[in-house]
């Protein structure tokens, strides 16, 4: 891999300092005090998606356009990749046309392999393992809500120890806030990420949602059935039922606590409609922040 290329395959590909600067830049972009001079004019961003997407795809495409550049949506079924061309050749070739590339796929190893052969920055647009772009938007939402220093916050993650939960583990370790994860037995986050975050940060994992949300500033969850797990939907609905974010559960958090969800959400499953559509919910701001945070990421990587 070319050492001078900075990829964004996991949240800690950015240092704490870079992450904080990126959030401040995202705020300036959101406020319109930066970015109007088309700083990425003439640049092209490719986007390979092997899974569905509403937010990630549209926010990257619109984001690069607003910065003066051009986005190309590349479904893997329309690329030769879908007919067996290697990731390595695809990566080497696309590197000669594009300035950066977003990939959404299943295995984290695929984005890593793509990055090894790329001579342009590769951005992880979600894998089964991680969703670092989501965390940029979530952290921006916390920055707006609670101010510049996030280290005094307590975040409660309720539900599946999935790709988004794994990325929260890294965020808590890098920025030093408290993270409490409550999952059913057998659905915990990645053990290695958990062990490191527990050692270096204020992270705890429990099977008790009430314990996790007690006094929290932020309560967050995600679907019980991530993309690729559709066959497990029935078992998961049963196992996760006690982990729904209800008004009752929210009442155990701070009175000023906010509710986050990366979306897409399933009302009546992981969250009660009254919570996600209620006054404590910030999910639409969070979704909008995908755009601003990723514009800041693009400027950081190729600006
Ligand atoms: N939160 C998120 O990544 O949404 P999409 O799957 O719609 O991109
Ligand atoms: N955990 C979910 C997130 C969707 C944005 C999934 O991987 O499907």
Image (spheres, helix red, strand yellow):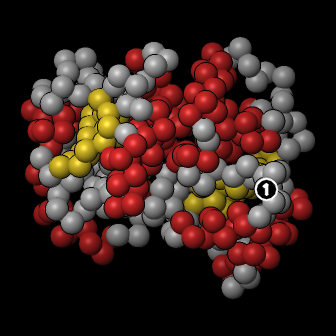
Q: Nearest the camera: 13 or 241? A: 13
The residue located at (74%, 42%) in the rendering is: 301
Q: Residue furthest front?
A: 199
Say if 134 sits above or below 215 in the image. below
Q: Is residue 76 visible?
A: yes
Q: Quadrant of the N terminus?
A: bottom right
Residue 64: image location, x then y, percent: 74, 40
Q: Is residue 240 left or right of residue 87?
A: left
Q: Nearest the camera: 96 or 269? A: 96
The residue located at (16%, 62%) in the rendering is: 185
Q: Within the image, what quadrant is residue 286 found in?
A: top left
Q: Nearest the camera: 268 or 156? A: 156
Q: Nearest the camera: 246 or 131? A: 131
Disc 1 C-beta below 8 A from ligand 1: no
Query: In what element is the residue under mark 1?
Result: loop
Say if 106 sits above or below 207 in the image. below
Q: Within the image, what quadrant is residue 102 found in?
A: bottom right
Residue 264: image location, x then y, percent: 39, 48
Q: Within the image, what quadrant is residue 218 found in?
A: top left
Q: Residue furthest bottom?
A: 84
- Tag 1 residue: 3
Say if 289 sits above or below 162 in the image. above
Q: Is residue 162 visible?
A: no
The residue located at (32%, 33%) in the rendering is: 178
Say if 5 sits above or below 118 in the image. above
Residue 106: image location, x then y, percent: 51, 69
Q: Quadrant of the C terminus?
A: top right
């Amino acid at each position: 891999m070319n050492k001078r290329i900075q990829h964004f395959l996991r949240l800690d590909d950015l240092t704490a300092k870079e992450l904080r600067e990126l959030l401040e830049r995202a705020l300036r972009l959101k406020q319109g005090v930066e970015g109007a001079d088309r700083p990425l004019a003439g640049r092209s961003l490719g986007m390979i998606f092997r899974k569905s997407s509403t937010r990630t795809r549209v926010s990257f495409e619109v984001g690069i356009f607003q910065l003066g550049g051009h986005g190309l949506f590349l479904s893997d079924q329309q690329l030769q990749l879908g007919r067996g061309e290697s990731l390595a050749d695809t990566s080497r070739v696309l590197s000669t046309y594009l300035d950066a590339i977003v990939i959404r796929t299943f295995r984290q190893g695929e984005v890593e392999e793509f990055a090894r052969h790329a001579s342009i920055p590769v951005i992880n647009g979600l894998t089964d393992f991680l969703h670092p772009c989501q965390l940029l938007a979530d952290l921006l939402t916390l920055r707006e809500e609670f101010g510049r220093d996030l280290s005094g916050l307590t975040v409660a993650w309720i539900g599946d120890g999935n790709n988004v939960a794994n990325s929260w583990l890294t965020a808590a370790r890098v920025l030093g806030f408290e993270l409490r994860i409550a999952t059913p037995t057998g659905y915990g986050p990645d053990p290695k990420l958990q062990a490191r975050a527990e050692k270096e940060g204020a992270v705890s994992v429990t099977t008790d949602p009430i314990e996790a949300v007690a006094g929290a500033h932020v309560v967050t969850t995600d679907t019980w059935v991530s993309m690729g797990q559709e066959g497990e939907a029935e078992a998961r609905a049963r196992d996760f039922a006690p982990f729904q974010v209800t008004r009752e559960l929210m009442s155990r958090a701070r009175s000023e606590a906010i509710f986050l969800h990366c979306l897409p959400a399933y009302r009546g499953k992981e969250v009660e409609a009254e919570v996600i559509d209620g006054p404590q919910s910030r999910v639409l701001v969070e979704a909008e922040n995908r755009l601003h945070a990723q514009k800041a990421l693009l400027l950081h990587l190729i600006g």
